[in-house]
Amino acid sequence: MSTLRERNAERLRNSIAGAPIDSHAVFNFYTYPFFHKHSNVPLNEYFHNPAVMLEAQLEVLDKIDNCGNLMPDVGAVAECSGLGGKVRFDSHGFISVHEAEIEEYEDVIKIKPADPYGDNYMRIALEQLEYMVQHCPKGMKVNAHPIMGPFTVAAQLRGISDFCADTIAEPEMVDALLDVVIQTQIAFLHAQEKILGAPLHHVLVCDDLSAFLNPQMYEELIIPTYEKLFAEFPNTQRWLHNDSTTRHIVSQIPKGGFSAWQYGPVLQPLEAAEGCGNQVTVMGGLNPVELAGYTVEQTIDVCNQVIDSFQGNPRCVLSAAGSINQVPLENIRAMMRVADERKISK
């Protein structure tokens, strides 16, 4: 008899393939604050000791029926750390990156594509990935480290407000910075292929900041970055995490070649699915802030309501986008149980 993990994984695969499903899958994006919250692992050890990271992820995933995969995890700093961004840790140990010293076009053209094996957090992510692959328990899988969207990386390096202004006032500088980011990310993905094997099954692209642009700018500036980035990875699925305010760019998401998209609670499930022309599996429906405060009974009621709103659309996956870090594990288990038990009428 199949496990919940196996059933959920098969449903997600079928949804992305546009194949029939018997029940809706569940997908959540679990990262270091989630594993820190539910394992009490010291974050300095989590980031810098692959054995500690693996143990923490296994411990927490076991508590949610292993419905999730292992993944190297250095937060959002990997690419930036090789391109001049300054990595910092707050008082809680949370990792972030401060912008590089970029003021004008001449500063950008001095930046060279970063070496993923250099003194940066891409190398640390690769070390984590290699350790996880070598020590992955039977029945578990290891995903590639997510990448940030090229626009998001460039905005982190330049400063978000300045970079958004540059899209209008300094388009040459924007193009140059995006190009060096994309070259760095291509090298990073090839390095991950050497460990996981080629092609990578999928890459999760986190690109919330791209939603700051209007639809025309999104099509003219953002879509080409995805095409340049994935041109060397034609057989790798593109998954998008953009849970920002995205209603204005929903119709643009399929143009980025994405197979799946985790959207934010600002959208209704069918609004996201139909806005994408039912070409993309959309993952959402639950507000993580609200979910964190629910009882198990409330969670079950809300999950049933969201699944009702799917109206049997096989492209819809139950998910809580955004900061799921404070959501109790019993609520996540309730999500899994409801989705597994609710069958889609034929």
Image (spheres, rainbow, N blue to C red):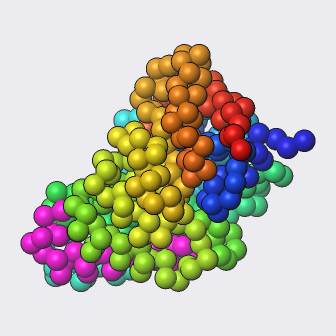
Range of magenta residues: 164-193
Magenta part, dominant SS: helix
Q: Nearer the viewer, residue 323 or 92?
A: 323
Query: How far from the left and from the top, in percent, is residue 330?
Result: 63, 24
**Which residue lies most toward the right here?**
1
**Residue 336 visible to an observer of this rendering:** no
Tell whether 198 sits left or right of 88: right
Number of marks drawn: 0
- Locate the C terminus by quadrant: top right
Query: How far from the left and from the top, in percent, is residue 3?
Result: 82, 41
* The quarter of the displayed image where residue 288 is located: top left
Looking at the image, which residue is at 78% across and 47% down?
6
* The quarter of the displayed image where residue 277 is located: bottom left
Q: Classify 18 as above or below 299.
A: below
Is residue 123 one of those drawn in magenta? Answer: no
Tell whether 341 sits left or right of 150: right
Looking at the image, which residue is at 47% across and 52% down?
273
Q: Classify 104 as above or below 81.
A: below
**Residue 284 visible to an observer of this rendering:** yes
Q: Classify 265 as above or below 12.
A: above
Is residue 174 one of those drawn in magenta? Answer: yes
Query: How far from the left and from the top, in percent, is residue 60?
Result: 66, 36
Q: Nearer the viewer, residue 305 or 232?
A: 305
Looking at the image, which residue is at 61% across and 50% down?
314
Query: How far from the left and from the top, in percent, is residue 279?
Result: 51, 62
Q: Classify 1 as above or below 111.
A: above
Tell whether 76 sits left or right of 178: right
Q: Nearer the viewer, residue 140 or 111?
A: 140
Looking at the image, which residue is at 59% across and 72% down?
236
